[in-house]
Image: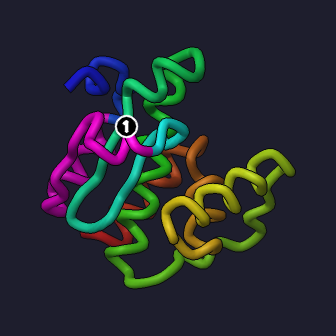
Amino acid sequence: MDFLLYLTPIGREILTGILMKNYQVQENAPICKKQKELFGYTKAPNLVICTDNIKNTVSPVSYYVNETVYHEAVHVIHSCIGGPISIRDAILPTDKLLDVLRSSKITGSPVVYETEAYYLEDKPHMVNRFMKKYCF
């Protein structure tokens, strides 16, 4: 899996937690080819990283691969607790709010889940703490 080459140490730690929760991690699954704007997708027990879509869309690739892993890990946490994390003050800039709405429409994920995932996708240490707190 190519995406493993891009992971930071904290990204590897988060991925290990995902695997410990018995998720099947896939790369460039058919959903990635159907939805070219999709970078990742999680529906228990599957987590998909669309590395080719990332490579063909944005740069730097390593940044967006890690951000996608962190984002999808938040959805794993949602599954662990059976609902939202209930983060206080999860304020997003306008561009990310538009991403939330687009992602919710594409995936059918509740807006609150996508809001939390977009809020935390650049906060890997918080994602890791939440994963340890709620999943283990």
Q: Nearer the viewer, residue 7 or 72?
A: 72
Mark 1, residue position:
33
> Would residue 39 be found to the left or right of residue 1 on screen?
right
State the residue at coordinates (46%, 83%).
83
| Image label count | 1
Give how far across and how far down residue 44 sits, in percent: 26, 67
Q: Nearer the viewer, residue 105 or 125?
A: 105
Name of the residue lying farthest toward the bottom: 82
> Would residue 21 be found to the left or right of residue 115 on screen?
left
Q: How is the image coloured?
A: rainbow
Question: Does 35 appear above or below 119?
Answer: above
State the residue at coordinates (84%, 50%).
93
Q: Nearer the viewer, residue 57 or 2?
A: 57
Q: Quadrant of residue 13?
A: top left
Give how far across and how far down residue 47 sits, in percent: 29, 52
Which span of residues is magenta-colored? 12-34
State the residue at coordinates (21%, 65%).
45
Looking at the rendered structure, the kind of residue marked 1 is Lys
Magenta span dominant secondary structure:
helix
Q: Quadrant of residue 29?
A: top left
Give how far across and how far down residue 62 sits, in percent: 46, 20
> Would residue 5 be found to the left or right of residue 70 on screen?
left
Specify whether residue 69 is painted magenta: no
Question: Does 52 appear above or below 22?
Answer: above
Query: What kind of element bears circle 1?
Result: helix
